[in-house]
Amino acid sequence: MPHCKRPHATRRQALHALAAGVATASGLAQAADAPRSLRIGYQKFNTLNILKGAGHLETLLAPLGWTVKWAEFTTGPVLLEALNAGAIDFGHAADTPSVFAQAAGVNLSYLAAEQPYPQGIAVLVPASSAVKTVAELKGKKVAVGRGWNVQYLLVRALEDAGLSFTDIEPVWVNNAADARSAFESGKVDAVGLWDPFLAGAQLTGSPSRVLRNGDGLSNNRTFYLSTPEFAKANSALLRTVFAELRKTNDWADKNPQAVADQLA
C-alpha cells in the first residue's frame, strides 16, 4: 500500500535489507545474458510507489540489461496471490496479509521490512455516531476485507474490549474504495482503512473520527517479498533495488511537498 497526509512519506521508513551493499554494474551485466524484466507489484502507499513515480530505477537498471514492469494492486492479499502465481517477481505487503499468505503455503521470502506504522491503520466511525468505544461495536456492521491488516486490528481491538469478531457483523469488501463507499453511504456503522485511504477518508470524506488505531495492537509493518528462487538467483539485482529504495526514502523525508505533488 505515500500533502495532506500523504501515504507514508512523512514517516521514516527504515529498510532492513537482509543483504547489504550495492552490486557493481559489471557484476549485474555478466549475470544477464539477455535483457530481462523485473516485475514489481506495488500498492498506493510506501516507498515503492514514490520510486515508480520518479523513474530512477528504470534509468539505473537499463544499462545493466534490465527493464522494469510495474503492476498496481488494490490490496496486499491480491498482490501476494500474483507473487504465488508467478505474475510478479517482487512486491510489498503489510504484516497481516504476509503472515496469512505464508500460513496458506504461498511461496515467498521476506527480504526487508519498514518501521512499524500503527497510526496508519484505524477503525473509523461517523463523527456523529453514538458509538464512542470499541465495545459499543457489538452487533454493528463493520466494512473490512478478508486478510487485511485492518481486519487483524479489528480482531485485536475487539478482544481488548472483551468482545470477539463474532460479536460484530462484518461486511466484506474487496478494496478500500468499496469499504469507503459503504461507510460514507451509511450502509455500515464503521470501517477499517489504512493509509493513504485512511487519510483520504479523514480529509475529504464525510466527517469521521478514529475509534481505534493500531497503537498497542498492531505494528502495521510493511514487508518486501519475493520468491525464494528469484531472490537466490538475483541477489545482486535486489541489493541494487534496495539501495535505490533507501535513497528514495531519504529524498522523500526531506521533500514532503515534492512527494505530494508527484503522487497527486
Image (spheres, rainbow, N blue to C red):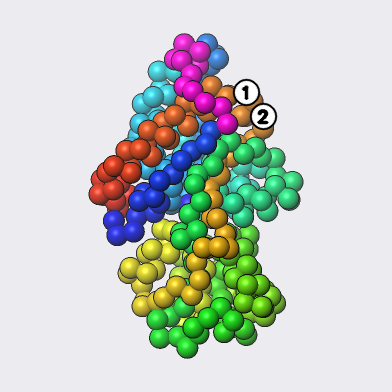
User: Element type at marker 2?
Assistant: helix
**Identity of the amino acid at label 2?**
Glu
The residue shown at (57%, 24%) is: 235
Would you say 218 lies left or right of 200 here?
A: right
> Residue 217: where, in percent of width, then height?
58, 63
Looking at the rendering, the stretch of residues picked out in magenta corresponds to: 18-29
> Residue 248: where, in percent of width, then height?
37, 36
> Residue 206: where, in percent of width, then height?
36, 77
The residue shown at (63%, 49%) is: 98
Alpha carbons under labels 1 and 2: distance apart = 6 Å
Magenta-span inclusion, residue 59: no
| Residue highlighted by disc 1 | 233
Q: Could you tell me if the residues under marks 1 and 2 are in contact, i.e. CB atoms within 8 Å?
A: yes
Residue 102 or residue 256, whichever sits in front: 256
- Specify the label residue 170 is tagged with: none
Magenta-span inclusion, residue 24: yes
> With respect to residue 227, does 180 lie above or below?
below
Residue 177 or residue 155, whichever sits in front: 155
- Specify the label residue 229 is tagged with: 2
**Would you call the spot at circle 1 few (<14 residues within 10 Å), some (14-19), or many (20 or more)?**
few
